[in-house]
Amino acid sequence: MFGIVPRSIMSGQKRRRRLFPVSPTPSVIRGLHYTNVYRSRSAISGQKAVLTEAVKAIKPDEVQKRHVTGDVISPGQVMGIEHLRDPRLNKGLAFTLEERQALGIHGLQPARFKSQEEQLELCRISIQRYQEDLNKYLYLTELHDRNEKLFFRLLSENIEHLMPIVYTPTVGLACQKFGLIYRRPRGLFITINDIGHVYDVIKNWPEPNVKAIVVTDGERILGLGDLGACGMGIPVGKLALYTALAGIKPHECLPIVLDVGTNNQNLLEDPLYVGLRQRRTTGKLYDDFVDEFMQAVVKRYGQNTLIQFEDFGNHNAFRFLDKYREEYCTFNDDIQGTASVAVSGLMASRRVTGKKLTENTFLFLGAGEAAIGIADLTVKALENEGLTEEQARERIWMVDIDGLLAVDRPEGNLEGHKKFYAKKHPPMKDFKAVVEEIKPSILIGASAAAGAFTPEILRMMATFNERPIVFALSNPTSKAECTAEQAYTNTDGRVIFSSGSPFGKVTVGEKVFHPGQGNNAYIFPGVALGVLLSGIHHISERIFLIASETVANHVSDTDLQRGSLYPPLSSIKEVSMQIAMKILDHAYEERIATVYPKPKDMRTYVQENLYKYYYEPALVPTWGWPDHPVVKTRAYPKSERKFYQPKETL
Ligand SMILES: O=C([O-])CC(=O)C(=O)O
Ligand SMILES: [Mg+2]
């Protein structure tokens, strides 16, 4: 069926606009089977005849092979200006003269040739020119849309500087301003009106080889609450880290918003809001919709597709995790990823305090996804140190919006896992009073209650403990329970602190502290990589404990001395690799891997499968190209063709 696209259909599509901003290349290939996508491309490129020719000439095996291995396929079928407009193929001024000539883009760009390194330098200069983080975010989004390899290389080589832009905290602001800054689609918006047709909507996604999905319904975006469809920024940001931190190929990643409405009155009244303008659908219809979504994903992309749930409302997050964890390849990042990174911090803290985890009293502010997730995984870690489950739970106290989780509190509200932590203790409302009463050694905030760890509470922590441990995990920065500075200054610099969003260094007296970021970004990319490469079907708690241990083992004495319980962000790529390798070992040991034969050398196996963000030579057609005869200009002088090596880093 190669090349057989009826002319009548194609010409009828001339008025069609471009449908997708992302790489058309696979669409073209899929277009052989899905003619609508093919038609839309050919219509805009105005090269339909040429495309038909080209498609005839490409050997199907070669195309399929290159696509399946995840490399950009550019066997020349995307020619001329379209080649520059395709973010996967575009190399900007890095196209060589020969490539420019053969691809029919000669003359469409200025004469200079640039190496990717030179382009990176330009990106850095450009970013530095922006004062506001949101503008930096927009610049990076535009780069992502324009030149994928350059975007990912820039991001992964400048994690410390750029992660706070494409991810927490700036991504939170981007979500809040989503209606204003929305330019081009990235990801799928599936609405409750699509019920009954979810599979068809997913089929519209132009990539045939999706392996990982991050999905949100936008009900609890970071600590910012219900942002409805504006929550799309979160799956996009998380998946950018899949690639930048764990080398998962971008075309294998799919961000999805399930738009079931929003209960955020401001958004409902905001003329700029881009989602469904209705209140959230709940109950059976909502559940049926999510069920249909899960089934449609498997039908379209197979049962090994990893589905990461992100920023759902509390109640739904737990329900869906319980409901789907044995049926699908899924995890909830806010429950399990956050738990894993927090427990990793707790494991590392043992080297500072000299105490076992069992010697601590834990107090949580918040009893939502993150807090319960951390508590549950902490119980597992305490069991590993010899306690029974019951003894472990006894050491964990929790305070939610109604006060201390106490068996007899009048409000009740002890559903789900909360009941495991409810104590036989007189009900108490006031958080400070609880701190005074319990005298915790470890205080963990996952409440989105900004400033709840008051200076007074922090000072109390410093009186009960030589080295108090305080985690202010709520995101973004504006929701943190206390700032790093407040934590250090109110404890004479004795606190062991970490936060979900990044804080800069803090100076107290002579000492400078560099607090670590206890963010699930240390966990989910590596877990996803390990799961995808081993083909594990179900993701157990053990996987997250393995991730915790791996991150904790990566913390050096220097990190601890600098005040951080986490390895530097600059080493997070190596950490992700390590997590993936540990998961692979575990998967083969436990016989839960489904990728066989077992790779001989795990590191080589992982490395061979990583996304390559260096440019590769464009493949150019060898069969001739009637509309684009190679423009044979005079050879450029050598001096013009030389690449310059930049020195600066961001
Ligand atoms: O996105 C982040 O930075 C961490 C996270 O999952 C959340 O806060 O919901
Ligand atoms: Mg989240």
Image (spheres, rainbow, N blue to C red):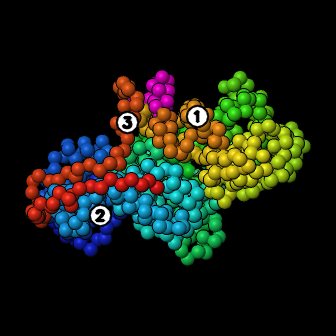
Q: Is residue 203 visible?
A: no
The percent position of residue 482, horizontal first and vertical second, equals 72, 53
Q: Earlier in the sequence, mark 3 or mark 1?
A: 1
- The residue type indicated by label 1 comes to Ser
Q: Nearer the viewer, residue 462 or 631?
A: 462
Answer yes or no: is residue 270 visible: yes
Front of the two marks 3 and 1: 1
Disc 2 residue type? Arg
SS of the residue under disc 2: helix
In the foreground, 593 or 337: 337
Which residues lie in the magenta part? 580-595
Q: CA distance from mark 2 to mark 3?
A: 29 Å
Residue 269: quadrant of the picture: bottom right
Q: Which residue: 16% across, 46% down?
A: 59
Q: Residue at x 48, y 22 (%)?
A: 589
Q: Secondary structure at mark 3?
A: helix
Disc 2: which residue: 85
Left or right: 493 as drawn, with respect to 25:
right
Question: Which residue occupies the foreground of this view, 261 or 505?
Answer: 505
